[in-house]
Amino acid sequence: LSGSSHVLSGQFGKKAGEAAGESSKAMESTAFAQLTEHLWDFMRTDIYPNELLFFKQVEEIRKSGPGHWRQPQIIFELREKAKARNLFNLFLPVDSAAVAGRKGGGLSNVQYADCCEIMGTANHAEFAAEACNCASPDTGNMEVLARFGTEAQKRQWLEPLLDAQIRSAYAMTEPAVASSDATNIRTSIRREGDEYVINGRKHWITGVGNVDCKVMILMGQTNSEVETYRQQSQILVPTDAAGITLVRAMHTFGDDDCPKGHMEILFEDVRVPMSSIIWEEGRGFEIAQLRLGPGRIHHCMRMIGQAERALSLMCSRAVSRKAFGQRLAEMGSVVQQVAECRAEIDQARLMVREAADRMDRLGNKNRY
């Protein structure tokens, strides 16, 4: 039972570092082992002891209402500590950083996946990720800008995002269509003179409830007459542009996910300059596929970290709790349940790391 909570001891980080060193894009294995040890120390020293404070500060922030939320003060304090430990922007992989001409974490997708699991042992699941500037949706947006943004777009939006001076959102999902199929997106992006005019309704747009969210990457339809996969484009939309209405904060089982929030947004004749288009018209579907691949790896590994945290608590309770004259840990059914949890978590980790490895070796666009 004691071995089932190994992720919280820091041992998994060392093993992962040794395995990930095989990738040609990966950080050297010894350096990565040192990095994960620094990350574990950051978790033990600064993250776990401040979890209750984080939630208390969030409750105070919630009272101001969506659109006025911002990260709690403890996040800003921990960001400075993460920077000092070189734990900032670990998410930006070697290839994207090279394309952008900016500094990233120097990690492969497999290595960053292992870091996501470590950060994911925090409660809230993105508490540590926020402190390291590795939280959604900013990471995906920064990678889009790094890979496809013009130099002007990088200066205006990527650089302040990398420095955690601002936040961002990704406006894709729509209430009227099944938005998991990006070809269904119907929000219109129409050319008019030297501007684009945007009209449509989005919902479940993460992060817009935060006052520091200054820009959205919006996916919409620029041309309904061309082939299916060339109809959509992605465009940068400042959150203070005229015609944007935050309709409401969405709730999941009563939770509004303050201070990020998931918002329903109405776009009515929102005008942005032609220079706001990302890459070029008709490339929105490709950008979406390239963006969402790494992002799913990040989320999955954070959830594996959450599962490890839960299993460690389960094991602690089984060892400390007695019933019918014996510890729970001595009952066969409890041992079986722990073993099944361990097997399922390990299976999930292996599958997600395999996906990350394929992205490192084959890229995000390979069909397999």
Image: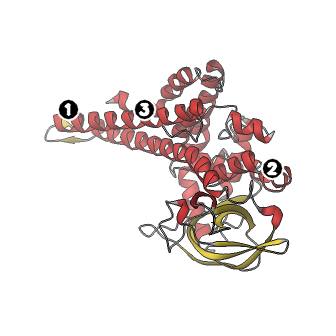
State the separation of the CA atoms marked 2 and 3.
34 Å
Give the secondary structure at mark 2: helix
Answer with the quarter of the image where residue 219 lies: bottom right
Q: Is the residue marked by circle 2 packed among few (<14), some (14-19), or many (20+) residues within 10 Å?
A: some
Give the secondary structure at mark 1: helix
Q: Earlier in the sequence, mark 1 or mark 3?
A: 1
Q: In the rendered view, how is the structure colored? A: secondary structure
- Residue depicted at 66% across the width and 27% down the height: 25
Q: Is the residue marked by circle 3 packed among few (<14), some (14-19), or many (20+) residues within 10 Å?
A: few
Q: Can you identify the residue that label 1 sits on? A: 330
Q: Can you identify the residue that label 3 sits on? A: 350
Which amino acid is tagged 3? Leu
Give the secondary structure at mark 3: helix
Answer with the quarter of the image where residue 65 lies: bottom right
Residue in front for this viewpoint, 339 or 343: 343
- Residue depicted at 28% across the width and 38% down the height: 318
Which amino acid is tagged 1? Glu
Q: State the quadrant of the N terminus.
A: top left
Q: Position of residue 106 (x, y in %)?
A: 70, 31
Q: Can you identify the residue that label 2 sits on? A: 159
State the separation of the CA atoms marked 1 and 3.
29 Å
